[in-house]
Amino acid sequence: MSYMMYVLLFGLVLGLVAVASNPSPYFAALGLVVVSGVGCGVLVSSGGCFLSLILFLIYLGGMLVVFAYSAAMAAEPYPEGWGSWPALRLMVGYVLGVGVAWVFLGEGWYEEDWGGFDGLVGVSVLRGDMVGVSVMYSSGGWLLVVGGWVLLLTLFVVLELTRGLARGALRAV
């Protein structure tokens, strides 16, 4: 099981490096979908099946919107791929940065800390991730309201920026 977790975490880091190098919006959206899938695999390996399913569905819905928007805004006839030299330099730099951070900060991260959500529940009929959902809605309700308002504000900002050629911030000068 720990080897599977190693593979998933390695895929998560490589996917994040691929997203951060970002040669083209098409490949960045593909990288985000892969990272979300691998991240949900990490959650499933830890025992959070319900949380993983919810995050995957919400994240893929958001990525569909982001991909459609980025494809419409940056319609390149020949998009630059991950094999180009600028993207490869960025990827090597990010991998080296992760390696340096692991050397300095990696002390104390062991496999024993990879326990599941349900390790201390005992004979309870509730799963750990399901209890977390109820706590999120009871204690973290204000955070959900603030997050909703931030998303609404972001929607209005994007709509104002892309309103049209004659009026709006993104017009040809």
Image (spheres, helix red, strand yellow):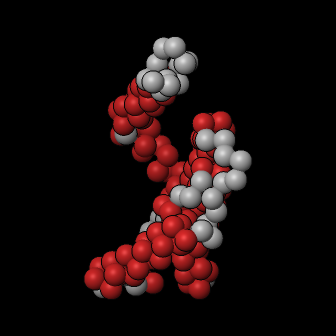
- State the residue in front, 113 or 134: 113
- Relative to residue 167, is residue 99 drawn left or right? left
Name the residue: 65% across, 36% down: 72
Q: Residue furthest top?
A: 166
The answer to which quarter of the image holds residue 81 is bottom right
The count of marks equals 0
Quarter of the image that includes the C terminus: top left
- Residue occupying image coordinates x 54% and y 77%: 10
Residue 44 shown left or right of residue 100 in the figure: right
Residue at image location 50% in from the left, 63% down from the top: 21
Q: Quadrant of the N terminus?
A: bottom right
Q: Residue at x 43, y 72 (%)?
A: 94
Residue positioned most to the front? 173
* Residue 138 at x, y percent in the picture: 40, 37
Q: Is residue 163 above or below residue 108?
A: above
Residue 159 screen position, x and y as percent: 51, 23
Q: Is residue 102 left or right of residue 12?
A: left
Q: Is residue 20 above or below residue 7?
A: above
Q: Quadrant of residue 75?
A: top right
Residue 36 shows up from this direction: no
Q: Nearer the viewer, residue 159 or 109?
A: 159
Q: Position of residue 135 (x, y in %)?
A: 42, 45
Residue 36, percent from left and from top:
59, 57
The outermost residue toward the right is: 77
Q: Is residue 75 visible?
A: yes
* Residue 41, image quadrant: bottom right
